[in-house]
Structure formats: C-alpha cells, structure tokens
Image: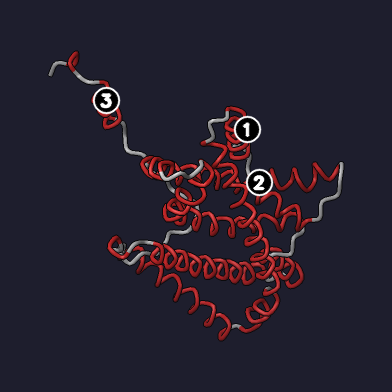
Amino acid sequence: MDHDNQQPGQSARHEESSRPPRFEVSDGAAIPDKSDKGLFTAWRISLFGALAIIVVLCLVKPDPYIDILTFVPDGVLVTFEVTILSILLSLIVGLITGLGRISKNPFLNLAASTYVEVVRGIPLLVQLFYIYYALGSFTQVPPFTAAIIAMTVCYGAYMGEIFRAGIASIDYGQTEAARSLGFSRRQTMFYVIIPQAMRTILPPVGNEFIALLKDTSLVSIIAVADLLRRGREFATATFAYFETFTMVALIYLLITLLLSKIVNIMENKMTPYGQQQ
C-alpha cells in the first residue's frame, strides 16, 4: 500500500482504529438489564437473598436485630435527604459545568475545565473535612450543610463531564437544522440538543446517583446522623458491632439494588421501542 497516497482522513481513521478500545467502569451499581441474563439473575439473587437474611436474623435473634431495625430508620431518611438534595444541586452545577466545557469562550472553558480537574483530583473525604473543619476556622458551617456542599461540589464535576459527553454525542446536523429554522444558539441548546442528550445522559446520571448515595456514608464522620452514623451510635451503646454493621450493610445493599432497578426502568421508558432489547 502506498502511504504517500493516503488521504488525511484515511490516516486519522487508521490511527484511531489502531488505538486500544476505551471503556469506562463506574463505581455506581450495575444496572440489572434483562438482556444481561447473568447480571439480572445475580441482581435477583442479591435482592431476595438480602431480604431473606434480614428476615431470618430477626426471627432467629430478635435481640438485637429488630432493635437495630427500629433504631436506624431516621438515619435512612437523612441519607436520602442528603442524596436527593446533593444530586439535584449537582445536576444544576453539572449542566453549567458541561456547557462551560464545550463553550467557545476561552475564559468559561478554562474555568469549567479547571474546576473539573481540581475537584476530581481531591478525594471526597478531604473535601468534606475541608468544608467542615478548614472553612470552619472562618465561618461555622452546620454538618448537614457542609455535607450537601461537599457532595454537590464533588459530584457536580462528574456530572459536568457527563453532560459534556452527552451533548457532544448529538450529531452536529441537529444544530445545523435548528439554526436553519431560525433558532438562536441558546434555543438550539436547550430546546433541541439537551432534550436529545438526556437519553444518553440518564444511565450515567443514574449510576452517579447510586454512587452518591453510597458515598453519603462518609458524612457520618462530620456528625451527620445518616444510616451509618446511627448504626455506629447503636453499636457504641450496645457493643453489638457485628450485628449492627451486618444489618447496616444489608440495608445499604437493599437500597442500592432497588435504586438500580428504578434506573433500569427509567432507561427503558426513555429508550425508543424499536431499540429496546
């Protein structure tokens, strides 16, 4: 083959095809899709297995397992409060960041890119400590507020990359068609591009939601009375550490499994009928 006669596009495609394939692994839950029989079966085994273990433990040894179940519900509520507030705020921050990442304005692009790089380079636990303890040297931040701020700042950066990738996945022809119809750039983005990108964005957003819920266990370190914190309080008072953290782990597992199924249902609802497995 005469390499001198290759067109630039052909060369670029050849280089791209020679690169190893890229894949991403999220720290969120695996989404139980029926098209993956192994994963779907494992999800059902895990869900019903966890429920069965909780029932058996409560029947065989009601003290302390039933006591634990009656002690931690308010912690579950706080966990969901932190998760929902944080995910809603991080979606707003993520959208702004994603738009900044694709902006042609060099200042906005640099600001958004720097935010993503800095925040993703610092562990969430360090961010929690910084907002609650370090900033506490200047102004007192309540534990619950500090948890929301830290979660929002951290996951806003990840959401920003999800929005950027989702928007970039939409064919540029959609933008050209909208502009030819007289839409402004802002109208094109919010009325044409982002609604289409939501189908692409939903699965990773669902994964981040579940990952965020699991990461809320870190907020117990700054005295937020979440599920883990309530479990620690019970274990400290009764010295039933094995029983308490076994039950806490099972509750987290149940919540995660149920949320992963809800995400799967939402994905299927947003997928065109002809494209469903």
User: What's the distance in space between the residues labelled 1 and 2, CA to CA?
Assistant: 14 Å
Instruction: Pick whichever of labels 3 and 2 is earlier in the sequence.
Output: 3
Circle 2 residue: 153
Q: Which amino acid, mark 1?
A: Ala
Question: Percent from the top left, x then y, of residue 229?
Answer: 71, 63
Q: Secondary structure at mark 2?
A: helix
Report whether 205 appears left or right of 142: left
Question: Percent from the top left, x then y, of residue 192?
Answer: 45, 50
Q: Secondary structure at mark 3?
A: helix
Circle 3 residue: 9
Residue at x 27%, y 21% (from the top left corner)? 8
> Looking at this view, is 60 or 105 the one in front?
105
Instruction: Pick whichever of labels 1 and 2 is earlier in the sequence.
Output: 1
Q: Which amino acid, mark 3?
A: Gly
Residue at x 77%, y 58% (from the top left corner)? 223
Q: Is residue 58 above or below residue 220?
A: below
> Looking at this view, is 182 or 58 the one in front?
182
User: What's the distance in space between the residues labelled 3 and 2, CA to CA?
Assistant: 40 Å
Instruction: Pick whichever of labels 1 and 3 is earlier in the sequence.
Output: 3
User: What's the distance in space between the residues labelled 1 and 3, CA to CA?
Assistant: 32 Å
Q: Are marks 1 and 2 in contact (CB under 8 Å)?
A: no
| Label number found at residue 7 | none
| Label number found at residue 111 | 1
Question: Percent from the top left, x then y, of residue 172?
Answer: 38, 40
> Looking at this view, is 243 or 110 the one in front?
110
* Number of marks in the rendered image: 3
Q: Is residue 194 above or below residue 206?
A: above
Residue at x 27%, y 25% (from the top left corner)? 9
